[in-house]
Image (cartoon, helix red, strand yellow):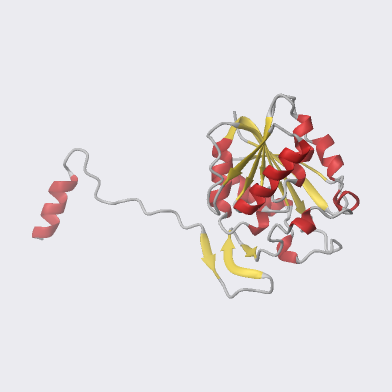
Amino acid sequence: MFRFSILFLLSSAPGFCLVAEEPAVHYSEKAPSRDGTGKVYMGREISEVVSQHAIGWLERRDREGEERPSLVMDQLGLSEDSVVADIGAGSGFFSFLLAPLVPEGKVVAVDIQPEMLDFIEGRKKLKQVINVQTHLGTIEDTKLEAASVDLALMVDAYHEFSHPREMAESIVKGLKPGGRIVFLEYRGEDPGVPIKPLHKMTVKQLTREMKAVGMEFVEVRDFLPIQHFIVYQKPF
């Protein structure tokens, strides 16, 4: 009774907050399935990382035929002064395709592996490209400058993020009002796409996860052989 009276008096004092807010819990755990980590986000088991950004795979000669990246460039609708973040840039394959499209802007090549950013820096010198900027992030934070990016591009990367909620929040923070995120992800709805299930994404699941961080669905374009091209926008 005495303890209750003290708490009541304290809680009545100006500026006193008796109950502290607990941090939101975004993830749960399960027994790992094949190719999975056992970590679950919004009903989706996060996949194991299998690509490891292998330069040989990212720079393979038949990538144009398999994934049609030149068509992707045509669909992005960039202005010459746009600032584009290539999230999970790896070897910079897409960064250097983007660079000529934004001659008065820049491409921010974001990766968590310093060796990949070193590789990109070497290619910059070789190609004499001045508007690609390397940027080191972490598994939880892109560390993009707030409201600095017009478009964030993620190519077959998001499904492998170990901290998708935190990464998505950091990307949204880095977008300007009205800025867009474009995802290229293997079509999870299509059993005919020859990719392991946990390495594919459905539009429904991705839209659910983007809505959770305040992004609005714009459209999905299925002009690529086996990938979705999905667009979300940050509200103005």
Q: Residue at x 85, y 50 (%)?
A: 67
Instruction: Measuring from the top left, give residue 171's x and y in whole percent.
Output: 58, 42
Instruction: Measuring from the top left, give residue 113's x and y in whole percent.
Output: 61, 54
Q: Is residue 37 above or below residue 78?
A: below
Q: In this view, does 120 lie above or below 60?
A: above
Considering every residue shown, the one lying at the far right of the view is 65
Rendered-image quadrant of the C terminus: top right
Number of residue marks: 0
Instruction: Measuring from the top left, give residue 136's x and y in whole percent.
Output: 57, 46
State whether residue 101 appears in this view.
Answer: yes
194 or 119: which is nearer to us?
119
State whether residue 77 appears in this view.
Answer: no
Instruction: Measuring from the top left, give residue 58's x and y in whole percent.
Output: 78, 54
Q: Which residue is drawn at 91% across and 51% down?
A: 65
Q: Is residue 169 above or below residue 36?
A: above
4 or 161: which is nearer to us?
161
Rendered-image quadrant of the N terminus: bottom left
142 or 204: which is nearer to us?
142
60 or 195: which is nearer to us?
60
Q: Which residue is drawn at 67% across and 57% down?
A: 159
Q: Is residue 155 left or right of residue 38?
A: right
Q: Which residue is drawn at 74% across and 34% down?
A: 129
